[in-house]
């Protein structure tokens, strides 16, 4: 049986899209993958990403965030509690 392990869940502050990240381990073994699930109302987009591509994508996201992070919705004293609430941790 394929095993899913939830890594994170959050909502984008401007668009309201819900993002879920899962580790996928297949019954037959082999390479684990990162499943990215994007929910937007009734529409779902699912991407299964290999580790090499995930690392490349993550580095590109970090470079972009470093270059553009001046003021982001969700920053400030309530950011941690907002992030926890989005993940369902509260």
Image (cartoon, rainbow, N blue to C red):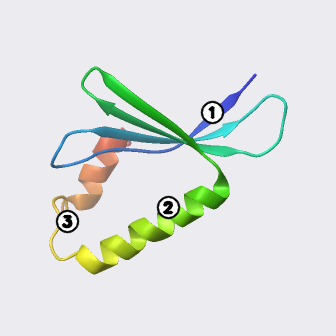
- Distance, label 2 to label 1, CA atoms, is 21 Å
- Circle nearer the viewer, 2 or 3: 2
Q: Between residues 44 and 80, which one lies in front from this camera angle?
A: 44
Q: Earlier in the sequence, mark 1 or mark 3?
A: 1
For residue 49, above or below residue 2: below
Q: Earlier in the sequence, mark 2 or mark 3?
A: 2
Residue at (80, 28) in percent of width and height: 27
Indicate the position of residue 17 as horizontal and vertical percent values.
26, 38
Q: Which residue is disc 2 drawn over?
A: 57
Indicate the position of residue 81 as horizontal and vertical percent values.
26, 53
- Circle nearer the viewer, 2 or 1: 2
Q: Mark 1 packing: few (<14 Cα in 10 Å), some, or many (20+)?
A: some
33 horizontally vs 38: left or right: right
Tag 3, which secondary structure?
Answer: loop
47 horizontally vs 2: left or right: left
Q: Is residue 29 visible?
A: yes
Quarter of image, res 15: top left
Indicate the position of residue 18 as horizontal and vertical percent values.
31, 38
Indicate the position of residue 78 as horizontal and vertical percent values.
19, 59
- Distance, label 1 to label 3, CA atoms, is 30 Å
Quarter of image, res 63: bottom left
Residue at (40, 66) in percent of width and height: 61
The disc label shown at residue 4, or none: 1
Q: Earlier in the sequence, mark 2 or mark 1?
A: 1
Residue at (25, 47) in percent of width and height: 12
Q: Which residue is disc 3 drawn over?
A: 75
Q: Is residue 90 visible?
A: no
């Amino acid at each position: 049986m394929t095993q899913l392990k939830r890594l994170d869940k959050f909502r984008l502050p401007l668009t309201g899209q819900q993002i879920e990240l899962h580790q996928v381990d297949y019954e037959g073994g082999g390479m684990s993958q990162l499943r990215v699930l994007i929910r937007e109302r009734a529409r779902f987009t699912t991407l299964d990403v290999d580790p090499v591509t995930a690392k490349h994508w993550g580095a590109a996201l970090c470079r972009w965030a470093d270059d553009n992070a001046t003021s982001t919705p969700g920053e400030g004293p309530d950011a941690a509690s907002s992030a926890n609430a989005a993940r369902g941790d509260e």
